[in-house]
Amino acid sequence: MLTARIARHPRRVLLGALAFLLVAIVLGGPIFGALEDGDGFVARDSESTRAVEAAERASGAEASPGVVALVRPDGAVGSDAGEQRLREVARELGAVPGVASVQGARGPPLTSTDGRTAYLAATLDAGVDEDAVVSALEERLGDARGVTLGGSLLADDQLGAQISEDLGRAETFAFPLLLLLSFLFF
């Protein structure tokens, strides 16, 4: 019975389907913004989240370093030139607004076994706009000789950009394909 009505008025059905699609896009579009939690896979009211928030309130800084800089000085890390380069990069990291502290060490924890590279770990102020700090760090040290930036904040930023790009590409291919399939089967 329904198929007979559709067969008798195909244009009305097509116009109705298009109208439904437009209404669904208008009403459903904002849902993607509402789904963004910003906390990733951590429950907001978990015990670990409360502990991290308490530590951040007490110290004024995030609980762990969010940015890591791998520094490859021209010489060995322990040489005068290597130590000078590490101090320069640490000073550049610390000069970015929103960076609370920069940790670096000589020896096994943050220096490679061959003594040619070292890590500097930057901890951000609690509650700072992490995206702005990441942008400032990339602008300041992104092209610096012998310095590679990394860490969870940069990885999150890069992952978010890649996922958005991939979803856009997938939707570009999926919508015409679904439209074609709906005409074929319905």
Image (cartoon, helix red, strand yellow):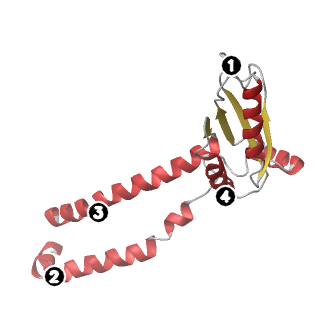
**First along the sequence among labels 3 and 1:** 1
Report whether 16 appears left or right of 153.
Answer: left
Q: Residue at x 42, y 77 (%)?
A: 26
Q: Residues within 10 Å of mark 3 (few under 14, many from 20)?
A: few
Q: Residues within 10 Å of mark 4 (few under 14, many from 20)?
A: few
Above-or-below relation of 66 to 5: above
Q: Residue at x 66, y 58 (%)?
A: 132
Report whether 22 appears left or right of 101.
Answer: left
Residue denoted by label 1? 115
Give the distance between the C-alpha atoms of the residues marked 4 and 3, in whole angstroms. 34 Å
Q: Residue at x 59, y 46 (%)?
A: 142
Amino acid type at mark 2: Arg
Which quadrant of the structure image shows residue 184?
bottom left
Which numbered disc, 4 or 3, marks the residue closer to the eye?
Answer: 4
Q: Are marks 3 and 2 in contact (CB under 8 Å)?
A: no
**Residue 51, image x, y percentages:** 81, 44
Give the distance between the C-alpha atoms of the residues marked 3 and 2, in whole angstroms. 21 Å
Mark number displayed over residue 11: 2
Quarter of the image where the N terminus is located:
bottom left
SS at mark 3? helix
Which numbered disc, 4 or 2, marks the residue closer to the eye?
Answer: 4
Give the distance between the C-alpha atoms of the residues marked 3 and 1, in whole angstroms. 54 Å
User: Hey, which residue is sitting farthest top in the picture?
Assistant: 114
